[in-house]
Structures are given as structure tokens and as C-alpha cells.
Image (spheres, rainbow, N blue to C red):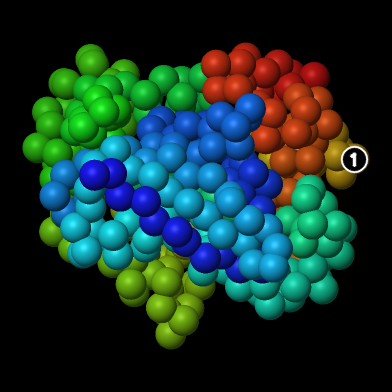
């Protein structure tokens, strides 16, 4: 019998708003159904992959979520699924932490569905977040979408309902560079992704250490810069996916934002330098403030993110950047 899990959420949590808050929600194996307000994907669990659909069943007096899987989960798997769904939806971010962000940047206090913006969605595992970050560097968004779709289709194990999972570190570590280049179309990233998978599989990338409060932001950022295929932009982005928001992830899209939203002028390097100074007052929340500005700019042109359909976003995002 398929397992159904009821999951508690912080009192200000809203599934639609908080899940559709970062671009990775559009990358396979993630799926968002605007009409039914349903999140679905496959999780890699102890006994193999399992597909689930999750909806928000209550807002008051306490938010509740219900996840239905396509197979029965063992007790250990149920705990594993809860942890991975919690990471994906940032359920560990408390209402008090969101209020602290709003105190620094009150613009987002009343945004989108009560409680305000503050959470950013991410992947069930740090490994998936790192791979998705590497596949988003030096490339247009449609290619990022395609790379992640191909990684799942070619290397992902299938759930009982036939849906593909994201490849595990062990699977990706055993894959030939030529396969990644030819079948998954990852280009120059082929060997770098394999090397990352090997490091993760061997335990050389520790999420526990990277998220430990005793580990400083400087220490975490410095370590991330040592990883294959990870430069300053990727390291900054992985930082926020670890729940560390004190770094910006600056790239060509940041230059566009600086020009169109902040009204900055001059050469790209000068704009990026001024943007760094601009967000400094937001302290440990600076990435949140920066990102929600970008997200609001997209939504002003493409409609609220909860209405976006995956097939249309590739061209929509590209078009928006050109305006």
C-alpha cells in the first residue's frame, strides 16, 4: 500500500509561494502543477527510488502538508523522506528567522500569501544542489533545463511508477565522461561532475560540516572554492543553498539587475563592485534581499511564479533577460 506522510510546517509556511521561490523548482526531476498546487518528484531512498506528490492540506491553525508515495516506505525510509522533503522546502527555517530577515528588509513582509517571503526552495540533497549549480554556470537557462532533464533520463533510477530520479553520487561517479558529454550534453563539465560525484560519494564533501554553526561563512566559502567546477559565483550560490545568505552569487544576470533595477551605470566590473556595497547593509541576509528583487522582476514580466509552466519558462526567462 502506498505510504502517505503528514508533515508539519512552520506557521508562516505556504507551499506555493515558498516552493516556487527559486529557479531550481523548474529543473528535473522537480515538477510543479499550477492548477492543483502540487509538488512532485522522485526521491532516492534506502530501498530505491520513490515518487511522491505533496500538497498543502491546511494553513490554519497550523500549516500541514501531505505527501503520497507510489510505494510503501519502510520506517527508516519514512524518516529519510521527511528529512529530504524538509530540506527541499526549507522547513527548518523558523518563523523567527523569517521575522529577523524582515526586520532587516521589511519590503518582503507582506509578499505573496501571508507571512512574507523568506524561504528559498532547494534540492533534497546538497549533491543535487551542487550539480545543478555547476550546470547553471556559463550557459543559457534553456541548456541548464536540458542538462538536468538528460541527467535524470539517462542516469536516474526509476520509481515504481516509472518516473526517473536524479542520479546518485555513486551512479554519476561510475559514468564515463564521454557518456555525460554525448548523452547528457553537459559539455566541458563532464569530468568535473564525475570528480564531484566521487568526492561526495567518498564523504569528502560534508554537509554536516558546511552547515555546522561552528563553521564560519568564510571557512565554508573557502572550501567550496576548492571543488571541481566551482568558482566564486557557484560557491556563493551553494552557500545560500546551505542556508548561508551572507554571500552574493554575482554573474551577468547580476549586471542586468544592477542596470535595470538599481540604475547603475558603467563597466560590468564596476557595477558588480557597487552591487556588493549596495547589499552590504543587509548583512547575513544579503542574498535573500538580492534574490527576491530579481524574482520580483521576473514575476512582474511573466506572472507569479506559481503560475509558471515548465515548458514555457525556458523561452520566457531568455526573453525577459533581453528586455
Horizontal and vertical percent position of residue 111? 82, 52
Figure check: 199 above or below 323: below
Q: Residue at x 70, y 63 (%)?
A: 60
Point out the image quarter for the C terminus. Answer: top right
Q: Is residue 238 visible?
A: no
Q: Which residue is mark 1?
A: 263
Q: Residue 25 at what x, y percent from top left?
A: 52, 38
Instruction: Determine whether the residue tagged by mark 1 lies in a helix, strand or loop.
Output: loop
Q: Along the line of sight, which residue is nearer the eye, 168 or 32?
A: 32
Residue 53 as seen in the image, left or right of residue 297: left
Choose top left, top right, bottom left or bottom right for residue 64.
Answer: bottom right
Quarter of the image that includes the N terminus:
top left
Could you tell whether 8 is left or right of 114 in the image? Answer: left
| Residue drawn at x 31%, y 22% as measured from the top left | 150
Residue shown at 68%/47% (left/top)? 17
User: Can you tell which quarter of the image residue 300 is in?
Assistant: top right
Q: Quadrant of residue 53?
A: top left
The x and y percentages for residue 229 are 35, 43
Residue 214 image point, x, y percent: 43, 85
Amino acid at each position: 500500500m502506498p505510504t502517505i506522510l503528514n508533515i508539519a510546517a512552520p506557521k508562516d509556511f505556504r507551499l506555493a509561494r515558498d516552493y516556487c521561490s527559486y529557479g531550481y523548482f523548474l529543473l528535473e526531476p522537480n515538477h510543479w502543477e499550477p492548477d492543483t498546487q502540487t509538488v512532485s518528484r522522485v526521491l532516492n531512498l534506502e530501498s530505491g527510488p520513490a515518487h511522491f506528490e505533496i500538497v498543502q492540506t491546511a494553513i490554519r491553525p497550523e500549516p500541514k502538508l501531505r505527501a503520497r508515495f507510489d510505494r510503501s516506505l519502510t520506517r527508516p525510509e519514512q524518516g529519510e523522506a521527511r528529512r529530504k522533503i524538509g530540506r527541499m522546502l526549507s522547513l527548518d527555517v523558523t518563523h523567527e528567522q523569517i521575522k529577523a530577515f524582515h526586520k532587516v528588509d521589511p519590503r518582503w513582509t507582506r509578499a505573496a500569501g501571508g507571512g512574507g517571503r523568506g524561504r528559498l526552495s532547494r534540492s533534497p540533497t546538497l549533491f543535487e544542489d551542487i550539480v545543478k549549480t555547476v550546470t547553471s554556470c556559463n550557459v543559457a537557462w534553456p541548456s541548464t533545463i536540458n542538462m538536468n532533464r538528460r541527467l535524470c533520463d539517462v542516469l536516474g533510477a526509476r520509481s515504481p511508477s516509472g518516473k526517473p530520479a536524479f542520479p546518485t553520487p555513486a551512479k554519476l561517479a561510475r559514468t564515463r565522461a564521454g557518456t555525460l558529454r554525448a548523452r547528457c550534453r553537459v559539455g566541458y563539465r563532464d569530468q568535473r561532475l564525475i570528480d564531484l560525484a566521487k568526492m561526495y560519494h567518498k564523504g569528502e564533501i560534508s554537509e554536516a560540516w558546511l552547515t555546522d554553526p561552528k563553521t564560519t561563512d568564510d571557512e565554508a566559502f573557502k572550501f567550496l572554492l576548492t571543488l571541481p567546477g566551482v568558482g566564486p559565483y557557484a560557491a556563493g550560490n551553494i552557500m545560500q543553498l546551505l542556508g548561508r545568505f551572507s554571500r552574493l552569487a554575482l554573474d551577468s544576470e547580476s549586471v542586468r539587475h544592477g542596470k535595470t533595477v538599481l540604475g547603475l551605470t558603467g563597466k560590468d566590473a564596476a557595477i558588480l563592485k557597487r552591487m556588493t556595497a549596495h547589499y552590504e547593509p543587509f548583512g547575513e541576509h544579503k542574498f535573500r534581499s538580492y534574490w527576491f528583487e530579481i524574482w520580483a522582476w521576473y514575476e512582474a514580466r511573466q506572472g507569479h511564479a506559481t503560475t509558471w509552466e515548465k515548458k514555457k519558462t525556458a523561452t520566457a526567462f531568455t526573453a525577459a533577460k533581453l528586455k
